[in-house]
Amino acid sequence: MKSQTKKLSIVSSLILVAASILIVISLFFPWWKMVFVAPQYPEGLNIIVYPNKLAGEIDIVNGLNHYIGMANFSEKNFPELSYLPYLVGGLASITLLTALLRKKSVLYGLIGLFVIGGGLGVFDLMHALKKFGTNLDPHAPIKMDPFVPPILGHNTVANFQTDSLLGLGTYLVIAAFILLLIPLWKDRK
Amino acid sequence: MKKWIPIASGLLAGFVAATISFADFSAKTNTEAASTTKSDAEKVYVPFGQKDDYYLFASGGHSGQMFIYGVPSMRKIRTIPVFSQDSATGYGFDEHSKKMMGDYTWGDLHHPAFSETKGDYDGKYMFATDVGNSRAAVVDLKTFTTKDIIQVPNTAGPHCAAFVTENTEYMFLPTRFAVPVGQKYESLDNFSDQYRGVMSAVTFNEKNQKLGIAYQVALPPWSYDLSDAGKKSSADWAVMTTYNTEEATTNLEINASQADRDYIVLFNWKELAKMVKEGKYENVGGQKMIYPEKQKGGIYLIPVAKSPHGVDVTPDGKQFIASGKLAPTMTVFSFEKAFEAVKNKDFAGERNGIPILNYKSVMEREVNPENALGPLHTQFDDKGMAYTTMFISSEIVKWNPKTGETLDRVPVQYSPGHSVAAEGDTVAPDGKWIIALNKIAKDSYLSVGPSHPESMQLIDISGKMKVIQSSPVDPEPHYAQMIKADKIKTINVYPKDPKNKEAVYKQSDTKIVRNGNKVDVYGIAMRSKFIFDAKAKRPDVIEVNEGDHVTIHLTNIDFDEDITHGFAINSYNLNMEVQPGQTNTMEFVANKAGTYPLYCTNFCSALHQEMNGYFLVKPKQ
């Protein structure tokens, strides 16, 4: 490293520490969810995705989905849930490390990691949604055209209105990402 | 530090978005409002999306069932089968309910009583008695299903109860009919010597949800009509009315109405329990029986105007009010005066070995509203005012127990037996509503022939009493209980029970096990299929041999509120239900060879009509 590599300020370092804390906290909150509302389910059924588990009315959604021949959602079908917490934890550690090293170049690398990780996450979710929406059992009692539920936003499937939403965990990570950008602004030359 | 502003506002926007996405802003709705500004129609109208303020639990009389209504809408919500079979829920067909019912197929459910904590309804359990076949039952209010039924020996027709003590220590079951102990044969000529009106102290074990009998009391061979437990300062005591102290054995209409006075039985249940603990009882066929003429103490008689029906304790627990039935009088007695008379042995002789308290020493006032005839039963409002049903003059009279003053009266159509006010027999009545449980409804509703339903009339008691709604009801609410809706906490689905060996929660775990001529099926029901053996060529078929003993355990694996499945075998006279998450069992002998469709009886889904299979019985070779 050359000596002209700009050291990050103490304040920036603290901001990075805050970012790493936000990331750790995000592990305990849902990252994404889909809400299903039908005339006979006005209260809504949920599929809630945490970094390490699925929650919500998964069994009921599965029970209903078998009518259109959709495969079951289960933690078994999402191996990501077994290692995602470690990846996120790793990211938090690297963020903390960046805060300690206080090197701008490392921060650039970290931001790059965030972008790549985020991109992979979105791709993985899209892939899963496509897999479930398009691999419908041809013997299902109710025939449906294959469909891909959106990652964010509204969709209609038979009697269900679905809404895909980001969870608090994702918002925390986004907040952490914004915190990563602040030192670039603050310690700009 | 202006450069912070865009960053801070960005963060803020993020959290606002998260809050909007996840926070619950739904407003709570409530039908309660200033009732004075509403019309009668508005008072009883509960729009879709809102719920009633109160549950009404009306006894179903000789239907053997209990009826659940909502108040103020007076809409019927549910029938709970208790003492009678009910094919709609499979009650009396599945093993648990069949065993509980024994060999009986009907009952006469009279007086329901909520479990209480500190004299107030706690919304956990409902107790009921069966005059028809001398039983008591408990209903779990988490599921609104009957959990246990107990046969009460030495007694015949526990009409007078159930009434529970302040913290549900006991539910007392006094009896309407006197019989010899053990209900053995005995000539009616020996009525006074050999017959008894046995009262039972029933206990409830909340842990295993079982009823038991702590002890019994061999009271004189009279008829015991109604009863109530004391409250607060009188909590250790209870009162009940008697008639036929004449000990008549025939034509009771005339012969039991001769004496000018019958009695109120006043007893201290803590003292009775203590006597039992000290061994002051006799063992009678496994029951601990107190004979009041031998094991003295704890029981007293108070003279009262003849053939009284109700006796009701005021919310403050200081007074009890007997309703004269044949005498047009409500008599207000004072607990404190009664305790004083007991202490001072202020007795006017004995009857059947039980001391009689001096009437004048205990009586506070006789209340006789003008032309009010046939007082039967009294309820209370939030100010402690009394509301007494007048069976003969067909009205409810509101009066002040402290002064005897008549405050208001309202005609009802017709002949009210009991009435029920909102939490009207607790230490803290709510006021607001009283419902007249009328016996005659001949011109109230569209005619259905010579016999008519009973009627329940909703009366607004927030101002001048006014009948504002009338609801037909099947025979026959004798008494009812009205409880604030939020006190009852139901479950939505039965939770998984990993310890239940009869339950199967995974399709792949289903199996049919054969042991000689015993066939055990561990199956599941789900929208929209039965699976009895996942590995079989046809998983929804049960095939047995003629004469096989078949047990079918069925688990509803739709853990989804209100997705109840039924299970019937055509022509085998069998049907049961499995509520969401529940495991239920049907047991029978396949004594008819042939082909019998089996199907879901409780409409469950768009493919309910496809939810069937076959029960095949191979004929004997």
Image (cartoon, coloured by chain):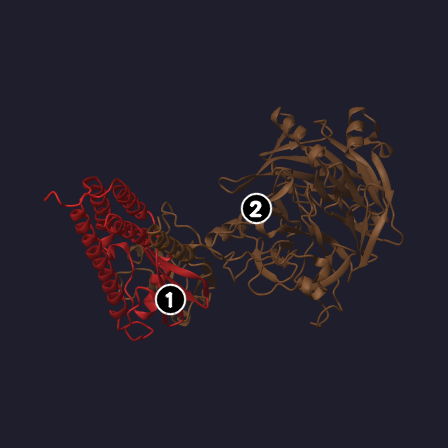
Parent chain of label 2: B
Q: Chain of mark 1?
A: A
Q: Which mark is residue A116?
A: none
Secondary structure beneath dot 2 equals strand
Tell me if residue A98 can be seen.
yes
Identify which amino acid the numbered label 2 is placed on.
Answer: Tyr
Between the residue at mark 1 and the residue at mark 2, the CA separation in whole angstroms equals: 40 Å
| Residue B89, position as x, y percentages in the image | 51, 60
Q: Nearer the viewer, mark 1 or mark 2?
A: 1
- In this rendering, the answer to whether B35 lies above or below B226 is below
Decide which of B391, B285 is in the foreground and name it.
Answer: B391
User: In screen coordinates, is B335 left or right of A29?
Assistant: right
Asked whether the residues under the numbered discs 1 and 2 touch, taking CB atoms below 8 Å apart as contact, a structural biologist would say no
The percent coordinates of residue B288 (x first, y second) are 61, 32
Residue B469 occupies which quadrant of the picture?
bottom right
Residue B125, label in figure: 2
Q: Which image quadrant: the C terminus of chain B?
A: bottom left
- Residue closer to the observer: B246 or B470: B470
Characterize the local packing of mark 1: few (<14), some (14-19) or many (20 or more) Cα atoms within 10 angstroms. Answer: many
What residue is pinned by disc 1? A162
Say if labels 1 and 2 share a chain. Answer: no
Q: Which chain is red?
A: A
The answer to whether residue B618 is visible is no
Q: Which chain is brown?
A: B
| Left or right: A188 in relation to B86 | left
What is the x, y in percent for residue B579? 45, 57
